[in-house]
Amino acid sequence: MSAAVPKTFFLETFGCQMNAHDSEKVVGTLLGQGYLQVPTVEEAGLVLYNTCSIRDKAEQKVFHRLGDYKKLQKQGKQFGVLGCVAQQEGEKIFDRAPHVSLVCGSASYRKLPEMLVQIAAGNQRVTGLDDRETDECFETEFTARTNPHRGYITIIEGCDKFCSYCVVPYTRGKERSRTSDSVCGEARQMADRGYTEIQLLGQNVNSYKDPAGKMTFAELLTAVGEVPGIRRVRFTTSHPRDFGRDIVDAIDASAALCDHVHLPVQSGSDNVLNAMQRLYTRQQYLERIGWMKSAHRELSITTDVIVGFPGETESDFEQTLLLLKQVEFDAIFGFKYSPRPNTPSLSLENAIPDEEKSRRLRTLQEAQKAIQTSRHQRHVGRQVEVMVEGKNDVRGHWLGRTSQNKLIGFTVPDGSVPRVGSYVPVVTTVSFPNSLMGEMVL
């Protein structure tokens, strides 16, 4: 009797780190169900798209991709849409793309094994759309991690903040945390497999609440940092409302916790923050910045900013520019406001024209570039520990990241070949607005 032909799948991921890690767990689930991952759509029997709907036109990108491959349905292929667009659009996806057989939101990933059975049986409309109903997290026996040295652990799923511009509370469900025992157990397993850097993930990672009541978020950070073999612990993304001083104290007390905090501010204006329903004021945000600036170690602080929110006046925008100068962020991720389906901000008046949003974004980026240029110059002459990520074959130098999450290219002494995933000392010699250059020292 000949061996059974393996079921094959192709998975493409759109979006953020949460989506990337969700895909690692989805792949692990599929492999556990006897599927074989293949590198191209053409080779796959099941084609999956893990989608993101945070930014404008995300849905169009997904439907265009589905349209491109509609002709492949004739070859017997099945298609599935996962993630935020799946949850947002729901069964309407079947109407717009009739060749899709599976629509599954991220809050329903734990049901994937039974949905895969239905797909394999030829069911043409399989759905998992739990929305805010579930209290369960997506935990898997096997995660197909794509990086052998740095890995993610999701500690909290969903969101209860309901910012007026954001779809996440509707697409990823309510906040639900894993137990600290489960998180620490996964960290130990990763360390046993040779991982040295762990990044804890959540839509609002510091909103973590241990269901067992054993640890606060700060205590969990410390516990993961104490796992033998783990040299670096990062976390993202934090919400200012739940950012306590105990987090800074934990970073100060544990060398394994990285010198970097990403704390989205979104706007420097109280009027806009209130309209965004961000649940904090400018002054409260600056209080948290003050805690980080007074830490015993120099912390790199990065943020997210939205420009052109409905009703944002020129004065409101100037308040954001002033905040940048006041804080001196090491990096920002700036975005033009884009209306998202089913969010409260859709009903707000005084929409900002797109050309004005573009102007404000350019102004924001130019102001930040000057700040980053100045801040990066301060690193020249310093020695830093760098985790080696690979080699730039075009330019001939190596690449890595510091504890502050700064990208640095570096040359190595003749005859030296650093191992990817290792940690090496580098002296910074040149600075650029977005990166550093240096020389590895023996």
Image (tube, rainbow, N blue to C red):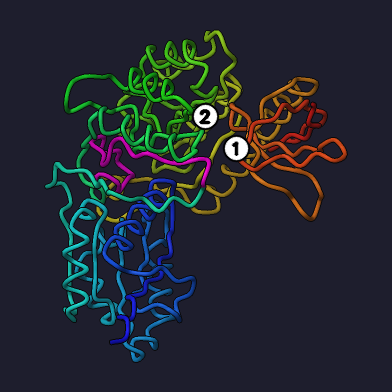
Determine if the magenta segment contains residue 150: yes
Is the N terminus in the top left, top right, bottom left or bottom right quadrant? bottom left
Q: Which segment did they paint magenta?
A: 148-169
Residue 63 showing in the rendered view: yes
Q: Nearer the viewer, residue 389 or 320?
A: 389
User: Is 296 on the left-hand or right-hand side of 52?
Assistant: right
Indicate the quadrant where residue 34 lies: bottom left
Q: Is residue 38 above or below residue 155?
A: below
Q: Is residue 75 above or below residue 317?
A: below
Q: Amino acid at mark 1?
A: Leu
Give the Cα distance between marks 2 and 1. 8 Å
Percent of width and height locating residue 237: 41, 34
Residue found at x 24% / y 34%: 178
Label drawn at residue 364: 1
User: Is 64 on the left-hand or right-hand side of 314?
Assistant: left
Percent of width and height locating residue 50: 36, 61
Q: Amino acid at mark 2?
A: Thr
User: Is 426 on the left-hand or right-hand side of 222?
Assistant: right
Residue that carries the numbered disc 2 in the rendered image: 320
Q: Nearer the viewer, residue 21 or 99?
A: 21
Q: Nearer the viewer, residue 292 or 268?
A: 292
Q: Furthest residue to the right?
A: 414
Task: Look at the numbered disc 2 and give the secondary structure of its residue.
Answer: helix
Task: Look at the numbered disc 1 and give the secondary structure of its residue.
Answer: helix
Percent of width and height locating residue 339: 36, 52
> Of callouts 2 and 1, which one flags the residue occurring earlier in the amino acid sequence?
2
Residue found at x 53% / y 25%: 260
Percent of width and height locating residue 84: 31, 56
Determine if the magenta segment contains residue 249: no
In the rendered structure, are the residues bearing label 2 and label 1 in contact, judged by CB atoms less than 8 Å apart? yes
